[in-house]
Amino acid sequence: MKLPILLLTLFALCPPLFAETKPNIIVVVADDLGYADVLFNPQHPKEVTTPHLDSLAKQGVICRQGYVSGHVCSPTRAGLMTGRYQQRLGLYTGGEAGSGLPMSETIFPQYLKPAGYATAQFGKWHLGPDPAWSPALRGFDEVFGFLGRGAHDYFKLDDPEDPIYRGTEVVKEKGYLTDRLGEEAAAFITKHKAGPFFAYLAFNAVHAPLQAPEDEIAKFNMGNKDRDARLAMGKRMDDAIGKVVTALKDGGVWENTLLFFISDNGGPLAQSADNTPLRGGKHTDYEGGVRVPFLICWPAQLKAGEWQSPVSSLDILPTALAAAGIATPAETRFDGHNLLPLLKGETQPQSRDFFWCSGSDEGWWAVRSGDWKLVGEKDKLGLFDLSKDVSEANDLAKQMPEKVAELTKLHDTWLADMAKPVKAGEKRYDMAAPAAKKMTKEEKKKVRDMERAKKRQPATPETPEAPKP
C-alpha cells in the first residue's frame, strides 16, 4: 500500500513531471520553391534532389492542396506571422508588406514566450527593411539573418550595405548563407533541447540571385544555367533541413517536435522553376502562384499520410498555439484554423473559402469556394473546376456566368472587411477609377484642328464699362 501512496504524493507535489510535455515547434519556409521541385511531388522532374524533405514527407502529412495567402514573398509572411489575411492590415503587395508589418501586431514569439518557449528567427525577414523592424524587437530571443527587401547575396556575408544581423548587431560572416542558416538553427535546437522551443527558419533559397557553390552546380547539367543553379540551391537547402532534423534526433526531441514546411509562393517560371501540373507561377493567383509544397510533421501525434482537403499557411499559427495548449485571446480573430482535430481524425473537413487579392495596381485577385475557383487578372476573369481541372486549362466563365457572379459576390463580401491598401490604389482592380480613354489619331487630329481654328478667330473687343451714375 505504501507504493501507491508514495506515487500519489509525488504527483500532488510535482504535477509538471506528469503533465503532457509541450511540443517544440519549427516553421521552415522556402523561398520561391517550385511546386514540382521536391521529391514528394509525384510529378517531379528526374533531376530534383531533396531526400531530406522526402524523408520528412514520409514521416509526416503531405498537404496536397496547401495554399499561401499571397503570390509573392512578404504578403505571405505577414499572413503567416499573424494568422490573419494580410489585407486586414492594408498589405496587398510586396512593397506594402515589405515596408513593415505594424509593430502593434502580435506574432508567434509573443504568444509562445509567455508559455515558456525559447524563440529564434533565422534567415529572411522581409517584414520591414531596416533595424527599426527587426524581429529581435518582436519577441525573438535569438536572431540570425537579414533585413532589406527580400534578397541577399549567398556568399557576400560581410557587406555593410546589406549586413547579416545577430540580434540587433551587425556581424561579419563567411560561408554559404543557406549552410549558415541550417547550422545556426541546429545549434539553437541543441542548446535548447530541454525545451520547449520555437524556431522560425526562413531560407532565402531558392530566391534570386541564383547562386550556389560551383561543385554543387556541377552535379546538374540540364543545359540551362538558371535551372542548374536553382537545383543546386534546392539541394543545399535540403541538406540544411537534414542538419536540423539530425539535431532534433540527436537531442532526443524529434518525436515531440511539430514541424511545418512551406514555400512562400509558387516558383517563378522566368527563373526556370517547375510548378507541374499547375498553371502559372509567382506573381499570379493561378494555382502555380499560390499552391505550394506543404508538410506537417509531428511523429508523436500525427499519423503519416496525405491530406487532400485545402489548407492554408494562415492555419499554421492557430495550429501551433493549439498544440502548445495556448488559448487564443478573446480579442484575437484568426482567419486560419486549428488543423489538429482534422489531422487526428477527430472531426471531418468542412468546405472552406479562400481569398487572394493584390490590390488595384497589380490587378490580381481570386476566390476558391469548394472546388470552384474564380481568378481575376485585371479585367479578365477565369472560372475553373479544380476537382477536374487542377491545371486551370478549361475556363468556364462564359458558360457559367451565374457561378462567376456568385463567386464575385463572395469576394466582394470578404473584401469589404479588409482595410484599404496602405500605399496607393483601391482594394481590387475593378474598383479603381477607369483610365482615360486613349484617343485615336483621327480624334487627336480633330482636337488639333479645333485649337488652330480658335487661334485664327479675331479677338472680340471688350464692351466698355457703363459710367457710374
Image: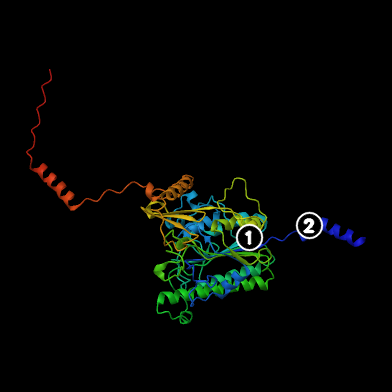
User: Which residue occupies the extreme front position in the image?
Assistant: 399
Q: How dense is the environment of label 1, judged by Cα within 10 Å: few (below 14), some, or many (20 and up)?
A: many
Residue 325: name its quadrant. Answer: bottom right
Residue 427 in the image: x percent, y percent?
42, 48
Q: How dense is the environment of label 2, judged by Cα within 10 Å: few (below 14), some, or many (20 and up)?
A: few
Q: Which mark is residue 15?
A: 2
User: Which residue occupies the extreme right position in the image?
Assistant: 1
Q: Amino acid at mark 1?
A: Leu
User: Which residue occupies the extreme top position in the image?
Assistant: 469
Q: Is residue 235 above or below residue 367?
A: below
Is residue 144 visible in the rendered structure shown here? no
**Residue toward you, 348 or 50:** 348
**Residue toward you, 174 or 81:** 81
Residue 238 in the image: x percent, y percent?
54, 73
Residue 336 in the figure: left or right of residue 13: left
Is residue 384 visible in the rendered structure shown here? yes
The reply to whether the C-beta atoms of the residues labelled 2 and 1 are less than 8 Å apart is: no
Residue 184: name its quadrant. Answer: bottom right
Number of the front mark, 2 or 1: 1
Alpha carbon separation for disc pair 2 and 1: 29 Å
Residue 420 in the image: x percent, y percent?
44, 47
State the residue at coordinates (52%, 70%).
41
Label 2 SS = helix
**Residue toward you, 405 or 32:** 405
Residue 346 in the figure: left or right of residue 284: right
Residue where numbered disc 1 is placed: 343
